[in-house]
Image: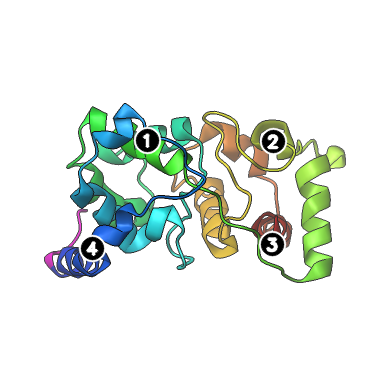
Amino acid sequence: MHLTIRNAAVLIGIALCVGPWALAADPDAGTPTDAQKALSQKTIETCAACHGLNGRSISPTFPILAGQTAPYIELQLHAFKDQTRADPDAQAYMWGMASQLDDASISGLATYFSKQRPMEGRSGNAALVMQGKELFTEGVPSRQIPPCASCHGAKAEGNGPFPRLAGQHAPYLLKQLLVIQSVLRTAPVMHGVIKDLTRPQMEAVVAYLESI
């Protein structure tokens, strides 16, 4: 299912309002690479309509892309384009968008967003955050659930194809855990890890991740 005409019109309208500010240089991003230079302003503006200026989304519906690992972004854009990532939000928001991207644009977007300064964590329920930290760093040994940190990094900064989770919107992360657990989103490695997690455990982990 691609974007409806109405939704597409809304996104285009927002993109026009964002205008050239979507290309504002992040002071911590460094010198633009050739891949970044190859991107059109229109492409970045379109992404900014949902994902925010420099990939710093303010809506929990749309993930923060600033500081995300380039390999992960590239993998997901290809999955949207070839429609192998088929969870409902992917179909509604990204299938149509990614269908317009060529390989060079995908690589350029991945590089661009990976170079942006990540967002800082937001405070949350202290008890829930502490519970989530324990799950993230230690897993649940009694149920053979490994720690999230073993793939995503000690500080959830991401590692190649394993995405950065630190500072991400908790509602977005929770939704992704649920669609992976229910196999609406195909992610065999993650499904194997989280298939036995309870929803309260997921809520604790995402509260911790949003806070760091």
The residue pinned by badge 1 equals 32
Q: Residue at x 67, y 43 (%)?
A: 156
Amino acid carrying label 3: it is Ala
Q: Give the class, few, some or many, for how many residues have Cα within 10 Å of label 1's Cα (few <14, many ≥20).
A: few
Of 25 and 206, the residue lying toward us: 25
Label 1, label 3: how far apart the Cα atoms are? 33 Å
Label 3, label 4: how far apart the Cα atoms are? 33 Å
Reply above or below: 179 against 153: below
The residue pinned by badge 3 equals 207
Residue 139 picture quarter: top right
- Secondary structure mostly seen in the magenta stretch: loop
In magenta, the rendered stretch is 1-5
Label 1, label 4: how far apart the Cα atoms are? 19 Å
**Sequence-first disc among 1 and 3:** 1
Camera-nearest label, 1 or 4:
1
Reply above or below: 58 against 51: below
Camera-nearest label, 1 or 3:
1
Amino acid carrying label 4: it is Gly
Amino acid carrying label 2: it is Gly
Amino acid carrying label 1: it is Pro
Camera-nearest label, 1 or 2:
1
Q: Are marks 2 and 3 in contact (CB under 8 Å)?
A: no
Of 126 and 92, the residue lying toward us: 126
Label 1, label 2: how far apart the Cα atoms are? 26 Å
Q: Give the class, few, some or many, for how many residues have Cα within 10 Å of label 2's Cα (few <14, many ≥20).
A: some
The residue pinned by badge 4 equals 19
Of 34 and 11, the residue lying toward us: 34
The residue pinned by badge 2 equals 153
Q: Is residue 77 left or right of residue 203?
A: left
Specify whether residue 98 is painted magenta: no
Q: Residue at x 38, y 33 (%)?
A: 74
Label 2, label 3: how far apart the Cα atoms are? 17 Å
